[in-house]
Amino acid sequence: KAGVTQTPRYLIKTRGQQVTLSCSPISGHRSVSWYQQTPGQGLQFLFEYFSETQRNKGNFPGRFSGRQFSNSRSEMNVSTLELGDSALYLCASSPGQDYYGYTFGSGTRLTVV
Amino acid sequence: AQSVTQLDSHVSVSEGTPVLLRCNYSSSYSPSLFWYVQHPNKGLQLLLKYTSAATLVKGINGFEAEFKKSETSFHLTKPSAHMSDAAEYFCVVSDSGNSGYALNFGKGTSLLVTP
């Protein structure tokens, strides 16, 4: 069974640009959530999607957005990049209820210069 | 909101000795709790989960954790450390809101295993 796939693995962008990250969940999983990991703030929740609907959102500015497609694949977008957006972005998939646990992808390492 | 506190930022043990990583939680109801491990430059791997069934939870690679409501704790243990256990460990609580879920992570405990 294929795991959670995140692309690309590494990305370097310039301040002010925008970026789109992709996540393909485990087949059959309908929930996809996104997390930002930085040395200073640790792991922080960005948002969660279930069946193409955003169910929950963390405390991030509106520059961070996401969406989920009918095949459960998800993308997150960050516009007007700032240096502080440099982080490891992790995607997690789940059947839909928290008691199943979450399977994480390997992440996308974003560097903003 | 549900939260967890990992009581040690670093733990060092010798290979073959027991491991104890401490976690306290704050929750207004019976929480779903998890332990995840992250090896360098890797994603997060689920070690075990507690979802209000048995209070002693067994996970992968010989790890287990005990849910103690009276102490609001969910400590992770392993009888005998292996060199490959060296990694960052996260205690996590699931927080539900707006019909969805969000994982709230502790700050992490870095486990060092010495020969």
Image (cartoon, coloured by chain):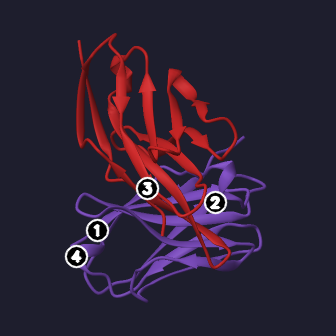
Chain colours: A purple, B red
Q: Is residue A26 visible in the rendered structure shown here?
A: yes
Q: Quickly name the residue at label 3.
A: A9
Mark-to-mark CA distance, 1 and 4:
6 Å
Residue furthest to the front:
B70
Q: What element carries label 3?
A: loop
Badge 3 density bin: few <14, some 14–19, many ≥20, Cα 10 Å: some
Residue B72 percent location from the top left of the image = 46, 48
State which chain disc 1 sits on.
A
The chain holding disc 3 is A
In-image side of A37 versus B95 (left or right): left
- The secondary structure type at the circle numbered 1 is loop
Q: Which amino acid does label 3 sit on?
A: Arg
Residue B110, placed above or below residue B99: above
Question: Upstream in the sequence, badge 3 or badge 1?
Answer: 3
Determine which residue is flagged by label 4. Answer: A83
Q: Are marks 1 and 4 on the same chain?
A: yes
Q: In which quarter of the image is residue A9?
A: bottom left
Q: Looking at the picture, which amino acid does disc 1 mark?
A: Ser
Q: Position of residue A54 (x, y in %)?
A: 64, 79
> Three-letter amino acid code at disc 2?
Ser
Ranked by sequence position, the earlier of labels 3 and 2 is 3
Q: Would you name the residue on which mark 1 appears? A: A86
- Indicate the quadrant where residue A52 lies: bottom right
Separation of marks 4 and 3 at Cα, in angstroms: 19 Å
Residue at mark 2: A24
